[in-house]
Image: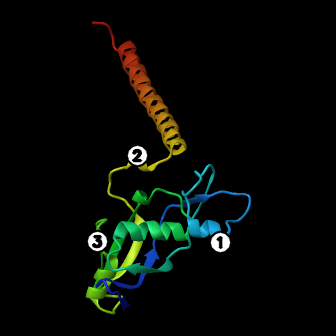
Amino acid sequence: MSLNKDGSYTGFIKVQLKLVRPVSVPSSKKPPSLQDARRGPGRGTAVKRRTSFYLPKDAVKHLHVLSRTRAREVIEALLRKFLVVDDPRKFALFERAERHGQVYLRKLSDDEQPLRLRLLAGPSEKALSFVLKENDSGEVNWDAFSMPELHNFLRILQREEEEHLRQILKKYSYCRQKIQEALHACPLG
């Protein structure tokens, strides 16, 4: 940790990546150069093709940040380091604390400052550590998806709707058949 002349400080935070879903990276014929990695995705040219893969389970990344660096900026920096082109809004930074054998996770707001939180918590990683996870707020943020992804969702929904409709028609057809059989079996009167 080092103190700057303006009263801010710089230091390292350790972030554990606990991602369940695959991430997207630019697909190219040649591996990215050091210059490309420094520039990061989405700068200069638009990404035309993507490759999806799973990041290693429980990968850990150390980031050098300022005390005024916000959680949203930490997420963006992590994605740049791994060349991930997915929308940063698909991810959230969580504070992880362990107390009395219980693990507690709290989602950080975009404006919270992780280095300040780390400093206030003291040196123990059990008291506070950071985890990057998918942003599962329960609501789907459709703006975070690309057009091909949205079209794919529509195709999936169409198939599910057709299958559901087929099952309903089959059920009512069976009921209609049973009622007609019962009517024919009953004596008139």
The numbered dot on residue 141 is none
Residue that numbered label 2 is attached to: 142
Residue 67 or 26: which is nearer the viewer?
67
- Distance from the alpha carbon under mark 3 to that under mark 2: 25 Å
Amino acid type, mark 2:
Trp
Residue 104 or 33: which is nearer the viewer?
33
Estimate the x, y position of residue 58 in percent, counting from the top left. Answer: 49, 77
The mark total stands at 3
Q: Residues within 10 Å of mark 1 (few under 14, many from 20)?
A: few
Amino acid type, mark 1:
Leu
Residue 189 drawn above or below residue 4: above
Residue 20 drawn above or below residue 16: above
Is disc 1 placed on a helix, strand or loop? helix
Q: Residue at x 37, y 78 (%)?
A: 130
Residue that numbered label 1 is attached to: 34
Of the two numbered discs 2 and 1 on the same chain, state the one appearing first in sequence: 1
Amino acid type, mark 3:
Glu
Which corner quadrant of the image does residue 138 belong to? bottom left
